[in-house]
Structure formats: C-alpha cells, structure tokens
Amino acid sequence: MAEDLYGGIFMKTFWLAAILAIAPSLAVAQAPRCPASATVPSKSDLPHLLMTSQDRGFLWKATKDGHTSWLYGTVHASREEWLMPGPLIRSAILQSQAVALELNLQDPQTLAALRKPEEPANREKLIASGRKKKLDALADELCIPTAGFATTAIGLEAAGLSASAARADGYYPDYAVDFVLQGMAGSLKKEVIALEDVQTQRNLLISPRLSEENAFIDETIKQISSGEARKDEDQLIAMWGRSDLTRLNQYKQWCKCERTPEEKRQTLRMVDERNAAMAQKILTLHDSGKSLFVAVGSLHMAGPEGLPALLKKDGFDVQQIVPAPSAKTSL
C-alpha cells in the first residue's frame, strides 16, 4: 500500500505547477533557519536575467498544414536565476498566436474551483483525525505560513508541502514555469487557452473517497518527514534544468510510480489518458488555424505516449529543439 501511495505522490507533485501558482507568495522566511523568501525581480534586474537566460526544459516545433505550433515541457518549481526563458523558448512564444496551458489561472472560476475545500464531512474528519494539525506542523518546519491553506482542501496542502520540500535548495514553487509563462502571455497580449477542465485536475488531486485522502496525506507526511520528498524534488528539477531528455523518456524506470498494478493505473490516468485528450485539443486548435505555444508538465512529453509522439502520429512534422537533437533523443 505504501509503495502505491508513494508513486501517487510523485505523480501529483510533478504536475502541481498550476495548483501551487494559486498563491505564489506563500513561502515566507520566518526565522534564521528558514530559506530566503522568493522575491520578484526588480525592473533593473530584468536585463541581467535576460542576458544570462538559458534554454531549459524540453521544446519541440510541430508543423502541419503550413503553420507551426510549439510544445514545451515545464516543471512545477524553479530557481530565481532560471526565471527568464531562454532565447529559443522566447522566440517560440513570440511566434505563437496563443499560449495553451493545462489550466487558465487568469480565469476567476478556475481559481475558485481550485481553492475550494473538500466536502464538509470529509474535511471535519480530516481535522478530527489530527492530519491537518500534522500538516500545519510540517508547514511550520518548512517555513510556509499555514494561512494560505486555511480554506483550501487539506489534500492540496499535503501535495503543496511536498512540492515545496526543496525550497532550502533554492527550488521555489513561486517560480513555477507555467506561472511565469502565463504572466508572459498576459504581458504580450497573447490569448491564453486551457487544455483541460479544472474539475478534471481537481479530481486527480483531491480524492472524493476519504480513505484514499487519508492514505495519501499519511504517506505524504512520511515522505516529507524522512527527507525523501526533498531528495526527489531536487532530482526532478535538476533533470529539467539540464534538459535531460533521455532521463525524462525513461521516467517509468526511476519514478517509483509503476511498481504495482495500482501505480500503473494511476500513471495511466494521470499521464497517458490526459495526453490523448490534450493531443486531440491541440490538433483541433491547430487545424483551426491557430499557432500555439503549448506548455504543460514535462511528463506529458515523455516516450511513445507523450505529446510529441502523439502529434507526429496525427500528421505533424515534429522537430526537437531543446535539447539540441541527437541520435539518442530525437523522435
């Protein structure tokens, strides 16, 4: 059972960018032991960030019927010095008519749905069981104010704390790549398109079954307390930072998320099935004449069921841009 849950934690925290970006200023240093707070760069910092920016993550160019869309694999936390996308990624955004993300966080209804707590009866039981108190204690250890989670689902607090475990190593959800790209889209007056329904993502994260919610929270507490969550967070974001596509494509070999039949079902539901639905929406939008910059969690780009491979099957000419293609990594 614990192994099944651990795989679920890995899958959930890897694609949490949109969820965590609801409150990007939650992480505040409270004591000398705490990591420095995430900060918003000043206007005077931007030229330096721009000049030193590097292309990180995973980028593909997808052409069909005479026009081009782009696929970009993101990660849910990043470093301040990585805040500005590199030149190839910036160029792709500028060439696109619209930015397509898993969710549109500029939509008030989307934000309200994400912030909504569990069903009252389930929430009361989670509080009575002491799980909320344990999570709040962990939040204090991680220097994350609990006020930001006061009215959200308790399962969301668990996943959020897990995804924030590597703040001490300089990786902040405040700098989630998806959130930064959404801000860029607004500044550039680009249309923002949601590829998924908010309820679909919420149902993946917050189980309506109390027994599943209990087990997920218990295992999350265990992984944060043991330091395992922080270790995995470091490895995942470092992989993204060096654009290690070979390792990304092999994620089922190291993610601890396909060791049991239940974990395989979770991976199918959280990645592969969503990929098929997103690929269909991308195809429809592209065929309508839109040039898209699609930015979703990097796992959605991996392997034969990833978005680049699926779009290639749909007739796109797909070219790997970041990292530069090689015999080992190109489609």
Image: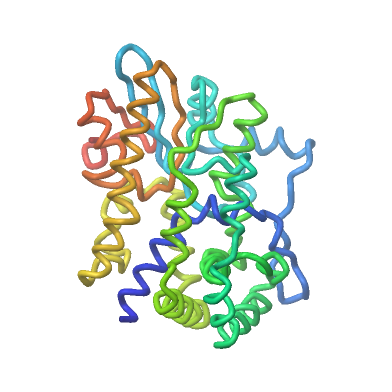
- Please say if 190 is above or below 42: above
The C terminus is located in which quarter? Answer: top left
Reply above or below: 292 against 239. above
Q: Which residue is pictured at 29% across the width and 27% down the height?
A: 318
**What number of labels is visible?**
0
Q: Is residue 289 left or right of residue 133?
A: left
For the N terminus, which image quadrant? bottom left
Between 200 and 139, which is closer to the camera in this rendering? 200
Coloring applied to the structure: rainbow
What residue is drawn where x is 64% and y is 34%?
50
Q: Residue at x 30, y 36 (%)?
A: 308
Judge by depth and name the residue closer to the eye, 96 or 130: 130
Work out whether 39 lies above or below 149. Answer: above
- Furthest toward the front, the residue is 121
Residue 140: percent from left, percent from top: 68, 77
Residue 309 figure quarter: top left
Residue 220 spot, x, y in % from top left: 47, 76
In the figure, 86 relative to 289: above or below?
A: below
Specify the farthest residue to the top: 66
124 with respect to 211 (left or right):
right
Task: List x then y, in percent, for residue 321.
Answer: 37, 31
Which residue of the protein is positioned furthest toward the bottom in this rendering? 129
Q: Is residue 202 left or right of residue 300?
A: right
Picture quadrant where residue 51 is located:
top right
* Residue shown at the point (71%, 33%) measured from the top left: 47
Residue 187 location (% of width, % of height): 67, 29
